Image (cartoon, helix red, strand yellow):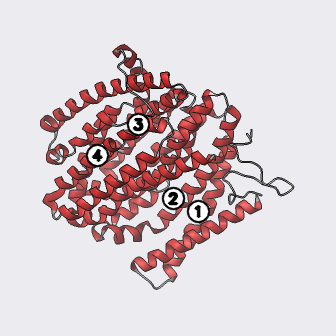
Amino acid sequence: MASSTRKNAMYNVAYRLFSVLLPLVTAPYLSRTVGTEGVGLYSHAWSVSYIFCLIGMLGLNDYGVRAIARVRDDREKLDRTFSAIWQMQLLVAGVTLLLWFGYVFLVAGEERTIAFHLTMMSVSCLCSFDWCLMGLDIFRPIALRNTFVKSAAAVCVFLFVREKGDLWIYAFVWSLATLAGNLSCVPGLRGKVRYRRVPMGESLKHLGPCAVLFISVMAVNIYRTMDKVMVSRLAGYAQNGLYENAEKIIYCLSGFISAIGTVMMPKISHMQQKGETEAIRAHIDRSMELILCMVSGMAFGVAAVADRFSVLFYGEAFAASGALMAPLAFTLILIGFANVIRTQWVLPQGRDSIFVKSVCSGAVVNLAVNALLIPRMQAMGAVVGTLMAEGTVPLVQWLILRRELPYGRFLGYAGTYAAAGAVMLLAVRLTGRLLPWTGWPGLAAQVAVGILVYGAVTLLVWKLEGRTYLRGLGRKKTKSGAAEAPADEKPES
C-alpha cells in the first residue's frame, strides 16, 4: 500500500470503528435503562429512519465517490461534477424529507415519538459531502471532526438518559449528532472544490446511474435493516431487542471491512481510469487474503465468547443475544469476501449491474426466509435469513465473474484462515472450561488466548508459505530470500 492509502485506511478504519463503537459503549447503559422492549422500539424506529436516509442519498455513497475520483485531476470537470451531483442530492433529499414527515405524522404507530426525534437524520442528507471528500482521497476531516461530535453525543446520553421515558432523548442526541457531523465536514471542501450553478438537466443526468446503485443499496438494506422491522412486526419488540444487540456487535466489526473498501474504491477507480489493470488484480489478491485473515479471526473469536459476552455486556435480560450472535458472526467472512470484489473490481469498472444482481438476489432470499422462519423461530429466523442472504451475494458474484478472477485461490485463503479460526475457537472454549475465573477476568483470559493462538497459527502459515507481512503489506519472499516490492510498485498477475 502506498503511504497515502495507508493513512487514509487508518483514518477511515479508526473513524468507522469509532462511529459504531460509541453507540456500542452506550448500549449496556441503554439496555439496563430501557430493557428489551425499549431497545426493540428504538431499533424499529431507527431502522425505518435509516431507510429514508438511504432514499435521500440515492446511492451517492458509491456513485459519488467513483464519479469524483474519476475527474479529480481536472479542476474544471471536478467543480462541474460536484455541483451537478449536489444539486441532484438537494432535490432528492428534500423530497425524501417531506415523505419522512408524512410517515411520522400519518403512518407511524407506537414509535412515532421516537421517529419524530430522529428527523435530523433525514435533514442531514441535504448536507452530506462524505462522497466528495472520499472521492478526493481526503479522509482526515471526516474522521477527526465526526469523532469529536459523536464523543459529545455519547456524553449527553450518559448525562440525560435516566429512565425508560428518556428514550426520545437518546434518539434526538444521535440524530442531531449525525447532522452536526455532516456539517462539521463542510469546511474540509474549502479550496478543494467549488460550487457553481449548472443546468438542472446536467444534474438529472446523474439520477439514472445513482438510481441503479440505489436499487442495490436498498436491497442490501432489506437484509441489513428490514430484518429488524420484520422481527418487530412478526415476533415483537422484545425479540427485536435481543436481535438488535446481537447484530450491533457484528455491525461494529464489519466497520473494519467497509472502511477498507471505502478507502480502496476511489484509489482503484483512479487506477482503472489510467488502465492499470494488472496492478488492480494485484491489489485485489492481496486485499482478499488480508481481509479474510482479519474477518476469520473476528468471526470465530466472537462465536467462541458470544454466550459469556452477551450476559456481561448487556445484562442477564439479554442472555439470549449470545445464541444469536454466535452464528451471525460468520456473516463477517461472507461480507468481507463480497466487499473486496464489489469495491475493487465491480464498481470501479462501472459494472453496476453485477452489484445490483448480487444484492437483489440476497434481498429476495432474505425476505423469503424471514417470512418463513421468523414466525416459527422468532429472532433466530432472522439470523438464518441473514446468513443465507450474505452467502447469496458472493455466490452470484462468482457465477458472473468466475472466469475473470482467481476464485480458487481466494477460496484457498478462506479455507486456510477458517482452519486457523477453528483452532482458535477450540482453544478459547477449552480455556473457558478450565479456568476458574468468571466474569470479565475470565472473558479477558479467553480473548487473550484467542489472540495468541490465532496469531501464532497465522504466522506459522505465513512462514511455511514464504510470506512476510512484517515489512510492508503484501510483500513476498523471493527464492533468494529478498522481499519483493509490494503490489503498488510491482504488479502481479
Give the amino acid at mark 1: Gly
Label 2 SS: helix
Give the amino acid at mark 4: Ala
Give the amino acid at mark 2: Ala
Label 3 SS: helix
Q: Residue at x 53, y 36 (%)?
A: 266
Q: Are marks 2 and 3 in contact (CB under 8 Å)?
A: no
Instruction: Estimate the spatial distance between the alpha carbons at disc 1 and disc 2, rounded to whole Å.
Output: 8 Å
Query: Which residue corresponds to mark 2?
Result: 299
Mark 4 vs mark 1: which is more N-terminal? Answer: 4
Q: Of the residues tagged 1 and 3, which is closer to the observer? A: 3
Mark 4 vs mark 3: which is more N-terminal? Answer: 4
Instruction: Estimate the spatial distance between the alpha carbons at disc 2 and disc 3, rounded to whole Å.
Output: 38 Å
Horizontal side, residue 469 vs residue 30: left or right: right
**25 in relation to 139, above or below:** below
**273 in relation to 131, above or below:** above
> Which disc number belongs to residue 180?
4
